[in-house]
Image: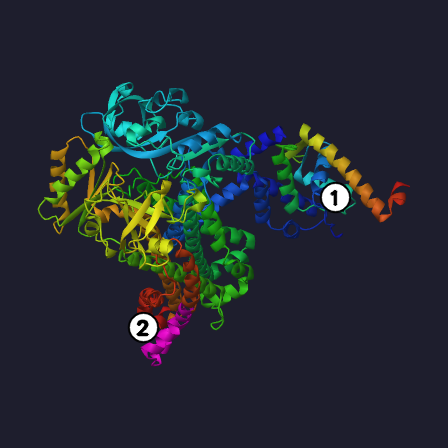
Amino acid sequence: MPTSTDLLQGTLDLLILQTLALGPMHGWGVAQRIQQVSNDVLQIGQGSLYPGLYRLEYKGWIRAEWGNSENNRRAKFYRLTVAGKKQLESELATWDRLSTAIGLVLGRNAEALS
Amino acid sequence: MIAELFTRLRFFVFRKKAVEVDDELHFHLEQLIAQKLAEGLSPVEARRQALIDFGGVERTREECDRERPGQWVSNFLGDARYALRILRRSPGFAVVAVLTLAVGIGANAIVFGLLDALVLHPLHLPGADGLYAVQQGRDHAASQSYPDYIDLRNRTRAFDGLVTYTMAPVGLNISGRPEQVWLYEASGNYFDVLGIRPYLGRFFHASDEHGPNSAPYIVLSYAYWQSHLQGDPNVVGRNVQLNRFHYTILGVAPPTFRSTEIFFSPALWTPIVNQPQIEGIDLMQSRGARGIWIIGHLRPGVTPAQATADLKNIGAVLSKTYPGDDDGITFSLARPGLLGDMLGSPVRAFVAGLGLLSALILLAACANLGSMFAARATDRSREVALRLALGSTRLRILRQLLTEAILIALGGAALGVALGTTLLRALSAWHPVPNLPINLPVQPDLRTYGVAVLLAVVSGLLFGLVPVRQVLKADPYQGIKAGNAAGSSARRFSPRDLLLALQIAICAVLVTSSLVAVRGMIRSLHSNYGFNPDNALQLNTDLDMGRYTGAQIPVLQRRILDTLSSVPGVTAAAYADRIPLDIGWSDASVFADSTTDYRISNVLTSAMQYAVSPGYFEAASTRLLQGRAFTWNDGKDAPRVAVINRELARRLFGSESKAVGSYFKMWGGTRVQVIGLVEQGKYKTLSEDPQPAVFLPILQSPSSWTWLIVRSPRDPRELAGTVDQALRQLDSGLPFTIDTWNKQLGTALFAARAASLALGVLGGLGAMLAVTGIFGMAAYSVSKRLRELGIRIALGAQPKQVLRAALGRVSTLLALGSAVGIVLGLAATRLLSYIVYQASPRDPLIFAGVVLTMLVLGLVAAWIPAQRALAADPLLLLRQE
């Protein structure tokens, strides 16, 4: 099993928002998707996933509804709200600024851009 | 932003059900198992691995919960519920803790109430921030003269308006029976400048004043209107008699307005232009007659410094223009409400001292509770260990302990404030001085409660944090293994011991200062006043109230005196215009015999001045040291003579023996011969330095103010009745008051008495805290070591050895703390000697008293634990475990 990478504080929220931007999804789905897209580097355990989802829901950025899963089980689906979309955009902008800046400091921008 | 707020609010109100999280986690787990199965594992193995991967559910559930807005509220409520349950299990501890804090917080609430009433918000007037009193002279006297007031009012650029006022007793006749009340004679602009609106009718204005005695109007205080006129709204416009002159009631002041002095609430106000009529002597014209007070509003934007400069300029002008009366005069600002700095400085010093002591009490209470909490934390180390083992965080446990502490603190604050409010209410209803509308209006309000709650939270945190280190260090494994008996090392002093020593030291400081105060009080009661108030009645009246004037006054005074002298049992009687140690006094400027220019800077000394009748020294029991006393021959046309006291003799002539027969000069150059020398006495306050005093024959300095002293061995109450009857036969319309001289002295002793009382109470509280602290510590240490003590007894230890083992440390701490406390206390009481008369810290009796008190406190507190230690039964104890 690949070692899980510690996520930067606050990054998890961004990942969840970005994942949910693709469409409504239940918690399991979100975790699976992040793991797949990151080539198994980012594994989100339930211990941080659900507190994260609840936090976003309490902030009003995502909304939860009970529905049926693909294998017809009762599951809770999350989807992005209008406020959540805005939040995602601003967080993406922040992320870009930050990663460019860090990249500049580390001298890796040229490689990253090429 | 708003949307987020509403979302939060929604979740705050409608909580998610706990089962929702569970369902979701369950679904997640099922998906995981399904995945493992798909990877080809057996159902059992898939489930096992999935559970391992999945990890603990409880923690996730808690963390999801923690994300909820307002989660801390329900956490706190949970903690509080748990704390209450725990406290209910040890009610003794809870009760002692709450009481201890109630004492500490109650004392501070009272002091804050006083501070608020006397220093922070002295006068409840509109715009009170810009209100200042104007004082005069180098010694910052509050008293001014009317001509100076007019000049100040007309010349100042710093004040929006200056008002002046003074108080006087009058005979008021509203319903047929004359009665003595106190009134303010106030400048016409008084109410307008202060911004007070009438409750009923109207007030007088500057436009009502048209020269002396031109405005026969009065305004009633709300309290007087309620108590004497039953709040009758028809009083406006009614005609009443004031010292037998006709006056009209204009209106009633609002209930919130008492007066412009904190301690004083007059029954009525009248324009100051009526002063000559009311007091029978015109004090409005003389620039040297200083007896009125001035306050005013600073103009918006004018700083106190600018105002002081403005006053300085005016002082310079007045000094130049009127060298006779105002030579070198200066003016300064003071906070209003306490007669400038005259009462203000001692009052502020007193409140500061009280504040310091009550803070010490609270600190002692916190130290007390801190050690109790530390002891409890030790006892609960097993519970803490168990909770840590079950996955609780240390932070959570600390929060739980703090919640407990703060709950106790709030309970203590509630009780303390309840006690404090009751006491403050009693204090504001207290009238310490007979015949004078003097009291201390302290209204505990929201601020007081706020301060109490704040103190509770702060002190709760303070003592609640004592066991923090213990909790942080707690090792669940050790805790459970060793069980309850996990004792810290017996040799070293723990923080708990230090807390006890600190607390005992603080209590010793309090006990010391209260003993110093009480001893000073006792001494002052037995000191030499220069007169003897025992077996003497004093009557006072102002013949103006009976509308006697001029030559009628001495005649009537003589008739009253003759009437009183003939009352059976009266051994001596005399009258004077004032008596020593009363609230007011008058100063006489004394010049050397060689002086010819009578300006202020040439005054040799000022002396307390008393005009007395023949027989006064005998009636007052003032010893005549040399020469003779006055006779009825020292009348208007006889040569001017005086009797002086030793201090004046020293200042005037350098020695006492040269005094009799020598001359000095008084205001205006009157040459006076000294015919007698009397002993030194107390004139203004008991704690004053020796004051010069001059006694003049009242026939040569007549006054309508009449204080009669009647000396008799008869029962004072019975005698007072006879005297009252005799006086009513002379003039039934003259209001007067009769009291024993000792009661009248309450005025002079008031400050010292109040201070002693306050310090005594604080000392008592300190002693109480010491007892609970020592008791708690001793009881705890005995119960901890009961088994060991039992074994010692079984092995044949003598009671002495058992006691030493059980209480040795407590005694050491007691001795240590007391020693430190006594040293600090003696240092602190040096400050007390400014307030409390004859409070000397270097009194061996006080030292012995404190040592004895602390010893007795220690014995009392350790008695029950000691009994318990001696009764330790080895068999019983061994059977217990």
Q: Secondary structure at mark 2?
A: helix
As shown in the figure, which amino acid type bears the numbered disc 1?
Answer: Gln
Cα distance between the residues tagged 1 and 2 = 72 Å
Q: Which mark is residue B863?
A: none
Left/right of residue B686 with respect to residue B828 in the rendered view? left
Q: Residues within 10 Å of mark 2 (few under 14, many from 20)?
A: many
Q: In the rendered image, is residue B158 in sight?
A: yes
In this orientation, which residue lies closer to the viewer: A8 or B748? B748
Depicted B51 relative to depicted B297: above or below? below
Left/right of residue B300 with respect to residue B592 in the rendered view? right
Q: Residue at x 33, y 69 (%)?
A: B866
Depicted B568 relative to depicted B881: above or below? above
Q: Quadrant of the C terminus of chain B?
A: bottom left
Residue B801, x across and y down, in percent: 36, 78
Q: Which picture quadrant has residue B528? A: bottom left
Left/right of residue B727 with respect to residue B45 in the rendered view? left
Tell me which segment is drawn in magenta: B787-815
Residue under pointer 2: B870
Magenta: predominant secondary structure element? helix
As shown in the figure, which amino acid type bears the numbered disc 2?
Answer: Leu
Q: Which picture quadrant has residue B732? A: top left
Q: Quadrant of the N terminus of chain B?
A: top right
Depicted B580 relative to depicted B126: above or below? below
Residue under pointer 1: A35
